[in-house]
Image (cartoon, coloured by chain):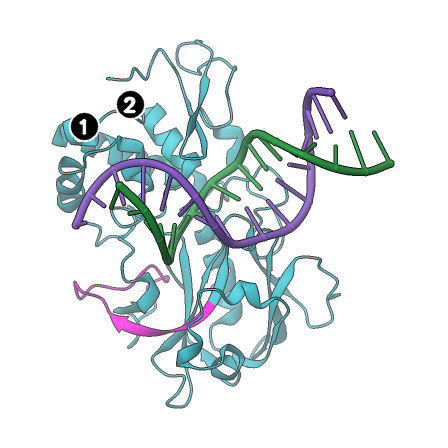
Chain colours: A cyan, B purple, C green
Amino acid sequence: MPELPEVEVVRSGLAPAVTGAVVAAVEVLDRRSLRRHDAASGDFETLLTGARVEAAVRRGKFLWLPLSGDERRGGRAVVGHLGMSGQMLLRTPDHPGDDRHARVRLHLEHPEHGELRVDFVDQRIFGSLAVDRLVPTTDGETGGFSDGVTGEWARQLPSQVAHIARDPLDPAFSERAFVAALAKRDTGVKRVLLDQGVVSGIGNIYADESLWAVRLHGEHPASSLSPRRVRELLAAVRDVLGKALAEGGTSFDAQYVNVNGASGYFEHSLNAYGRAGKPCPRCGTPMVREAFMNRGSHFCPRCQRRR
DNA sequence: CGAAAGACCTGAGTGC
DNA sequence: TGCACTCAGGTCTTTC
């Protein structure tokens, strides 16, 4: 459920608190949350303890904190993915540690803000944290979004994020490459929107919202769309993501929250997702939910014809 | 190589 | 009350 807007809310909340802080201690409460950490590169806690956080960067739904310190830590980052239910909660050191789903706790020491804690809380453990090495971007542009912070890590990204495409809000995102990618895909357009190797940051909610906005059925063959239609779709994606970000993201329950534990408001602005049986905001026809890739697709059977 | 299916997880909700 | 089942879903791995 955390898609680009929700992850960006977390990144922007984390950035001012953690940038410049030193990791004083690391507590791993559930090692399953380190699934994506390559133990061959070193122990997670050892690599992280003593390192200094240089920034908070995001590409699509991936979030990372470039590290500095001695030789072992420079050129690395702690990279996080929220999965379905992950949260990064900023807390004071004396906050009770009784969170049932707290998996990892980072104890930080900030030169100005003093001691603070980042709790990685994740009910379903689809999310993860890892210390990974940074690699240069292939196009020489910045690795991801980070409030315009510059430095040696600006044109780098974690090795495990290297195969993830840029997101539609990234200035270096290539519209031309996106049009070309859709043209050669032999599958439905929704599947391509969800393919993080083609365009990142979009999940089930914003895919359904974007397709509704341009009256496209998700099973419409991607390769049959004209370049003009693809650009319309991309504009809709950007519009939906931007509006959701402005409203602090979408949340249906307490699963998705910002670094202070608060929920966003975009749920009230949804036109398609989760609205099965309710009237289409455009034409009044009852919306439909269909099974799709072990989840649901929500659309208007009148506005969004299958081909 | 690309497309699709399966695995990974927990907890809320539903039907019997 | 309790048990079996379904649903939620992002990404990595496996299969074809």
Name the residue nearer the viewer: B6 or A276: B6
Tell me which chain the residue with mark 1 is part of: A
Label 2 and label 1: CA atoms lie apart by 10 Å
Tell me which chain the residue with mark 2 is part of: A
Apparent side of residue A226 relative to residue A115 in the rendered image (left or right)? left
- Picture residue at 42% right of the left edge, 61% below the top: A63
Is the Cβ of the residue at disc 2 closer than 8 Å to that at disc 1? Answer: yes
Whichever of labels 2 and 1 marks the residue nearer the N terminus, that label is: 2
In the picture of the structure, the residue carrying the numbered disc 1 is: A229
- Tag shown at residue A216: 2
Task: Answer whether residue A10 is visible to the viewer in this image.
Answer: yes
- Picture residue at 55% right of the left edge, 42% below the top: A264
Apparent side of residue A32 relative to residue A239 in the rendered image (left or right)? right
- Picture residue at 37% right of the left edge, 90% below the top: A71
Residue A132 lies in the magenta-colored region: yes
Name the residue nearer the viewer: A36 or A66: A36
